[in-house]
Amino acid sequence: MNFIDCMVQISGTTAAAETKGVQTYEDGTKTGVGVTLKHFAFNNQESERFNNNSVMSERAAREIYLKGFQIAVEKAQPDYIMSSYNSINGVQTFLHYGLLTEILRNEWGFRDFVMTDWNPMDNFTGRRGLKYGKMVDTFKKVAEPKGKLDYTDFDVCARAQLMYAGNDSEMPGAANYGVTSPNTELVYKGLNANIVDENGNALMRLGDLQRSAINMLNVILQTRIFQTDFYEKAQADAKDKAAAETKLKALETLKFQSVKVKLKSVKSNAKKTAKVTVRKVDGAEKYQITYSTKSNFKKAKTVTVKKASASVKKFKSKKTYYVKVRALKTIAGKTVKTDYSNVKK
């Protein structure tokens, strides 16, 4: 391992350790406090950082400049990522689908919230000269039929590309620094005006907006203030301790019922016995194994066991069996069941 490899490993491992330390307790539960990794990516100089264009090969990008982020994301799953102002090979990072979606989410498995740095559109939609980025040519084509450059259209189109690329929010969101309208108004305008590119494709897509909203809500649900407020309101609504406990048990029931059971393997042997193995479900007291020679589980038989791995006997030889499993738990004196797992034969 050379010097650069060592430094990349150190930076990534350090970032992962700090992220875990802030976001989780020793037992692995969430603290409700999130970490933001920034600036993603190639933000390698402070002077002219709004206009800087980092030019490099894909190998250099992946092995040096992205590797630290990759280690931190894969090992610690930070709640937030902040994109940078600069460009990479001529495309702004905050508008870069390959960087924010293909690499960050699809390759590395990032699940949460991506935001821009403060007011990135100032560099892009005309506030500083309308000269940065390849998408400017597309925006000009949109405006040409009107005979003039409408900055509102530029703002709408830029935010459409921003969401498509994988940025869930433009920070800080208000109308300032010369932006024509608050972000919400620009998004509504984009959805309702049906602004299209030269090929007739809508630039502002409802699906991109919905995905961004889901990512935002997911991180809000994990915050300490949301969890605290939710618990306090539940207590305030309860008339007495028994009512509060009933609500909490109901929440526990819903949480357990939503668990997706994973049936890992079914291995048979010559003794007409099959070993069924399930990925262990936290809190499960028993597992219910259902098997049948019919794929619709008609005339199925059921066995209940306490372990995530169990041997089921009395299989008929030279028969194909279909197997599925669900987890069981007793909550408030009632048996709560998850949905069945995937089916194996």
Image (tube, rainbow, N blue to C red):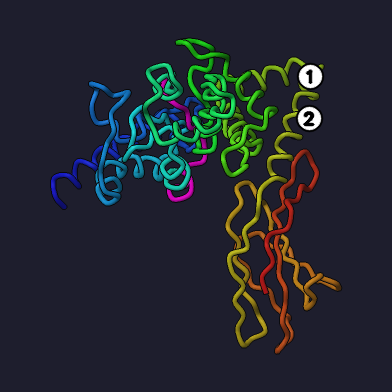
- Identify which residue is drawn at 57% across, 25% down: 156
Q: Residue furthest left?
A: 3
Tag shown at residue 238: 1
Task: Kindly indicate the quadrant of the structure image that contains residue 311.
Answer: bottom right
- Magenta run includes residue 317: no
Task: Quadrant for the C terminus, please.
Answer: bottom right
> Which residues are the magenta region?
105-118
Label whose residue precedes the other's in the sequence (2 or 1):
1
Q: Are marks 2 and 1 in contact (CB under 8 Å)?
A: yes
Q: Residue at x 65, y 23 (%)?
A: 189
Vertical relation: 306 (above or below) 248: below
In depth, the one of 337 and 71 nearer the eye is 71
| Front in this rendered view, residue 103 or 26 | 103
Residue 55, relative to residue 270: is it above or below?
A: above
> Residue 217: percent from the left, percent from the top?
61, 29
- Residue at numbered disc 2: 246
Crowd around label 1: few <14 · some 14–19 · many ≥20 (10 Å): some
Rounded to the nearest angstrom, the CA distance separating label 2 from label 1 is 9 Å
- Label 2 crowd (10 A; few <14 / some 14-19 / many >=20): few
For the residue pair 64 and 220, the one nearer the viewer reads as 64
Query: Looking at the image, which is closer to me, 204 or 345?
Result: 204
- Left or right: residue 65 compared with residue 214: left
Q: Amino acid at mark 1?
A: Ala
- The answer to whether residue 77 shows anywhere in this view is yes
Residue 340: image location, x then y, percent: 73, 58
Q: Position of residue 8 (x, y in %)?
A: 24, 42
User: Which residue is at a point 78% across and 78% down the rendered structure image?
Assistant: 293
Query: Element type at marker 1?
Result: loop
Asked whether residue 211 appears in the rendered view, the answer is no
What is the quadrant of residue 92 in the picture? top left
Amino acid identity at mark 2: Thr
Residue sitting at the far right: 299
